[in-house]
Image: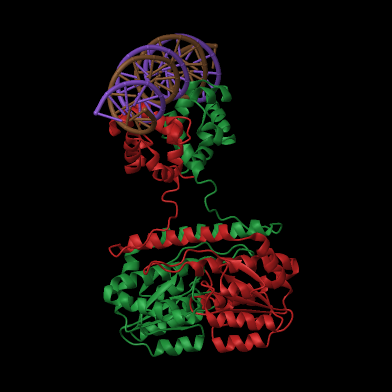
Chain colours: A red, B green, C brown, D purple
Amino acid sequence: MNILEKIANELDTFSKSERKVAEVIMASPNTVIHASIAALAKQANISEPTVNRFCRRLDTKGYPDFKLHLAQSLANGTPYVNRHVDESDTAEEYTTKIFESTMANIELARKSLDSSIINRSVDLLTQANKISFFGLGASAAVAHDAQNKFFRFNVPVVYFDDILMQRMSAINSQQGDVVVVISHTGRTKSLVEVASLARENDATVIGITSNNTPLAKECNIVLSVEVPEDTDLYMPMSSRIAQLTLIDVLATGFTLRRGSKFRDNLKKVKDSLRSSRFEKK
Amino acid sequence: MNILEKIANELDTFSKSERKVAEVIMASPNTVIHASIAALAKQANISEPTVNRFCRRLDTKGYPDFKLHLAQSLANGTPYVNRHVDESDTAEEYTTKIFESTMANIELARKSLDSSIINRSVDLLTQANKISFFGLGASAAVAHDAQNKFFRFNVPVVYFDDILMQRMSAINSQQGDVVVVISHTGRTKSLVEVASLARENDATVIGITSNNTPLAKECNIVLSVEVPEDTDLYMPMSSRIAQLTLIDVLATGFTLRRGSKFRDNLKKVKDSLRSSRFEKK
DNA sequence: CGGATAATGAAATAAATTTACATAATTCCT
DNA sequence: AGGAATTATGTAAATTTATTTCATTATCCG
């Protein structure tokens, strides 16, 4: 664990003097890593052995070892933390915060994924006669993107961001079809119904949603993307980004599974786009 | 710069003994950061002062300082590197690779962004009478997402992923309209034309694309998202993800700029969605 | 080959860290 | 509240670690 967080966590368990050290360290960790134990002790108005004991309490071998850990904690910069946008933020500040939160959330999503489920999903997708992507609102754009990706694979793929079309499509589905339903909340009524309809008509339903939600219960397989809910009004939902990355993973798995002949085909699609573009000089 | 890379780079400029130290360090840097100067000297079969001189040559204050730098270099572990997917990868492996590459690319994109340009773009968007988002292919989904985001702000916003609709819309644009054209390559002919048409009709054109491309030249403002091109057949284009995050930034800037009354309105939109969802138990 | 320059190491010095122990503060129990 | 027991803190010495100095050795170049 990051030693700075650890210090913050264990702040209550420290003695008076140890807390003094902790405060000095947290106030300017970047100075501390270049300071000697004597300098730090003086700064905190306590004795050198106290600093040493402080270090040991944090499971380091001693002061130099502690500095090493501290340096490593700092090396990651401010390692992609979920910081909230503030009303007084400058453009630079909120840009950084949003990008970093997005990264933090992608990281979280990655950790919550189960690769065996991804494997099974790829299995199903490669064997599908037809693939449909359904989403509403923000997830509609994800479904849109998914269609675009899978379209290149030369498989029958559709996407709908319209409730009626989704229902009709679900009702018309049959054995061998795979329906991918995308919803961050997993609580959008019409999507839950669509999932249910699709299953009644023998399609396999893959849900890209959170676990333990009404939608999750209707799916054959749930690819759960656990991303914190958007509690903050200013903060964008990065669940979409995580979902998109997951789609990338599925698409990649699909390509790998299909083997080399299939990949030649992919290259053809890519090349076919060339004439619509200006050449690079 | 990462000190390990630095060592590798300057390997030629080292003397015989220094090279011995370098080799020991590179062989097991994780051991070295816990070793004393004596231990390292012995390991490399050279004297302690030589180690010290080696450290100074690398612009560190001495051995302890060197260890600090080394520790920091190691701290980033394999920090979100762009690793390519391999044919023999397991699901777990390619999932990790894709997620990490995505993060690496988001990080790159963040670095390439200029916050003053973001600021100006937000200015323009808040003052726009009407906002249009245009994209094709993969960027169509980004435009779709952007529409969804800005729609919540209760401003006139449209998106088109159809060349003809884009052209018509561009031709009908007028002073005060903002057209956002999204394209990773910046070389898609029809989008370049649309940008040009929109400008001829007095719209302000914001490009979300790479710098120094035909499209960039047609725009009033270019939000350049520099993400490595997809050289690898298996690797997804993460430019979309970076673009989406940028859209998030613009939307957030928009909200902040519009002030508190506007944000009440936002909350209303959010609440209005509630009835379409299953309650959380 | 020989003088100049650079590289290296031994030993001494200086600095930093840790230990041992004494003292002060705090807690806990009656 | 008072005093033993425990815990926290500091002083000073010991130890470890790093750096400097300087003599020696190797390398380069005419």
Residue D28 lies left or right of residue B255; in this view the side is right
Residue in the image at 59% along x and 35% along y? B27
Residue A130 lies left or right of residue C21; in this view the side is right
**Picture coordinates of residue C9 (x, y %)?**
52, 16
Report the front residue among A110 and B204.
Answer: A110
Q: In which quarter of the image is residue A100?
A: bottom left
Report the front residue among B252 and A20.
Answer: A20
Residue in the image at 34% along x and 60% along y? A93
Residue in the image at 62% along x and 69% along y? A222
**Picture coordinates of residue B227 (x, y %)?**
49, 63
**Picture coordinates of residue A89 (x, y %)?**
30, 62
Residue B69 lies left or right of residue A153; in this view the side is left
Report the front residue among A205 and A126.
Answer: A205
Tally the marks: 0
Task: Confirm whether residue B235 shows in the render.
Answer: yes
Task: Confirm whether residue B210 shows in the render.
Answer: no
Report the front residue among A103 and B56.
Answer: A103
Residue in the image at 74% along x and 73% along y? A127
Q: In which quarter of the image is residue B245?
A: bottom left
Q: Quadrant of residue B206?
A: bottom left
**Picture coordinates of residue B228 (x, y %)?**
52, 61
